[in-house]
Image (cartoon, rainbow, N blue to C red):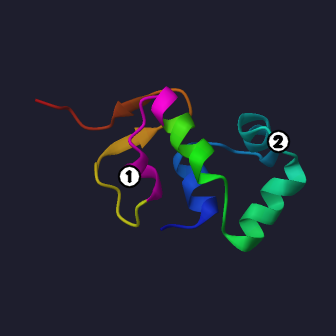
Amino acid sequence: MVAVKTILKRLRIKTDLEVSKLFGVSPNTISIWKARNTMNYQKLIIICAKNNIPVDSVVEEKPVISGMEYSLFSYYSTSSMS
């Protein structure tokens, strides 16, 4: 499993305030998650499902789908798909 900071970066979440609003927790909780390298993974799975983002590509050391960039609300291929 990758670091919490990496997961948030892959989702293109820039600030702890954005993360706290998304997960429904305080910004202080986000700081604790980062320090302890843990988070609410159940909520992360729900967020990914609602936004059509494969969870494996967010949490795996080497994303399953290469060449993909994700934003919080959508994803798009950076390379053309045949």
Q: Is residue 74 above or below residue 8?
A: above
Q: Is residue 58 above or below residue 71?
A: below
Residue that appears at 63% across and 60% down: 5
Identify residue for label 2.
17
Residue that appears at 70% across and 45% down: 14
Secondary structure mostly taken by the magenta-highlighted segment of the chain = helix
Q: Position of residue 69 (x, y in %)?
A: 41, 41
| Circle 1: residue type | Asp
Q: CA distance from mark 2 to mark 1?
A: 25 Å
Is 24 or 73 nearer to us in this picture? 24
User: Is residue 18 located in the magenta-colored stretch of the structure?
Assistant: no
Q: Which residues are magenta?
A: 49-59
User: Is residue 50 located in the magenta-colored stretch of the structure?
Assistant: yes
Q: Which residue is most to the bottom? A: 36
| Of pointers 2 and 1, the one earlier in the residue sequence | 2
Is 25 or 3 nearer to us in this picture? 25
The image quadrant that residue 35 belongs to is: bottom right
